[in-house]
Image (cartoon, grey):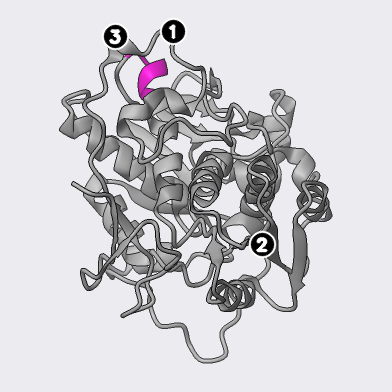
Amino acid sequence: MATTYRCPQDGTRADVTSLAWCCPVCRGPWDLDFEGAGPLRPGDLPGRVNSLWRYEEVLPLSSPATTLGEGRTPLVPLTGTVSAKLDFLMPTLSFKDRGAVMLAELARRLSPERVVADSSGNAGTAVAAYCARAALPCTVYVPEGTSAKKTEQIRAHGARLEIVPGDREATARAARTAADAPGTFYASHVFNPYFLHGTKTYVYELWEDLGGRLPDAIAVPVGNGTLLLGAALATAELLAQGLIDTRPALIAVQAEAVSPLAAAFHAGAHDLLDAPAGTTASPTLAEGIAIPRPPRARAILAAVRESGGTFLTVTEDRIRTAQRDLATRGFYVETTGVACWAAVGGWTDRSVVVPLCGAGLKTGLAA
């Protein structure tokens, strides 16, 4: 079967060699139809490259030229039932490297005139770094108020930085306008499904490190949902390959201040609820998940329900407390990255893994 983009809403397809960044009919994000190289055999893994590329059978790309050694981050117990995966130890200090390397490698093969991306910070720094590795010209759009350390990192990698007045939604609109220009590859961690096939390696690593099993639950912070949807892909694939017997519950965590998906989930809705006219998002320390209208909302809600999981929200005070608590345990994590510890750190009735997905140096300590 040829690898193609497919719109989950209307079935429209496009070749992955095109620069079409969204469905031309509904302007929604693509899914990816591809056939892996074969089943993953656990006995074949020892001795392979110590990066996410060791799972080549289940990835849509292979033999990368842009790798920075991403993946294979440590799994460390925090309590008797809660463990942390240290994705802030990635090359650009966040989990977004898992998907960014896929986008940059795809772009390198397509040789566009330019690459554009939009981000609240971490995806932008990752795309900038991997485009530098691939020698691709890159422009990153970020909202005003983005952490100075993140914008400094984007510039350091040689990308052009565009600071957009307004919120994250305004930034996305500006980037998508730029993405429509001929010869442009839109390295969107939201719209391009190659990113999700990078983030799914998070769960393959858990499965390998836990000796061929998964925890009872996997908690992830959710804004645009790229880590959660990657986790859903991986658990479905592992189940289909007979490598696990049951899928873990997906626990989606949002900041209480910006929690449109949690509101829709608990209302029993299959898509985002209509916000009252004039509604604006409240500020939150968890800037990386402050997404009022995630384009893949329907898929996120469905994935959580199908897994038997749920949505949890955390207050700003709990985020502050969680960041300091993790620091006393030796982990200095950015404010978005502590949301899951704030939500499930006290669980004792089942095993759960939380991602520490961004380094504290990216935002500093919450006041």
Residue at the spot of label 2 = 284
The residue sitting at 63% across, 50% down in the picture is 127
Helix, strand or loop at disc 2? loop
Whichever of labels 1 and 2 marks the residue nearer the N terminus, that label is: 1
Helix, strand or loop at disc 3? helix
Q: Is residue 57 visible?
A: yes
Helix, strand or loop at disc 1? loop
Q: Are marks 2 and 3 in contact (CB under 8 Å)?
A: no
Residue at the spot of label 1 = 47
How many numbered tags mark residues here?
3
Please tell me in which quadrant of the rendered image residue 159 appears: bottom right
* Left or right: residue 159 compared with residue 315: right
Please tell me in which quadrant of the rendered image residue 160 appears: bottom right
Please tell me in which quadrant of the rendered image residue 44 appears: top left
Kind of residue sitting beneath label 2: Thr
Give the crowd class for mark 2: few <14, some 14-19, many >=20 residues within 10 Å: some
Percent from the top left, x then y, of residue 167?
Answer: 66, 74
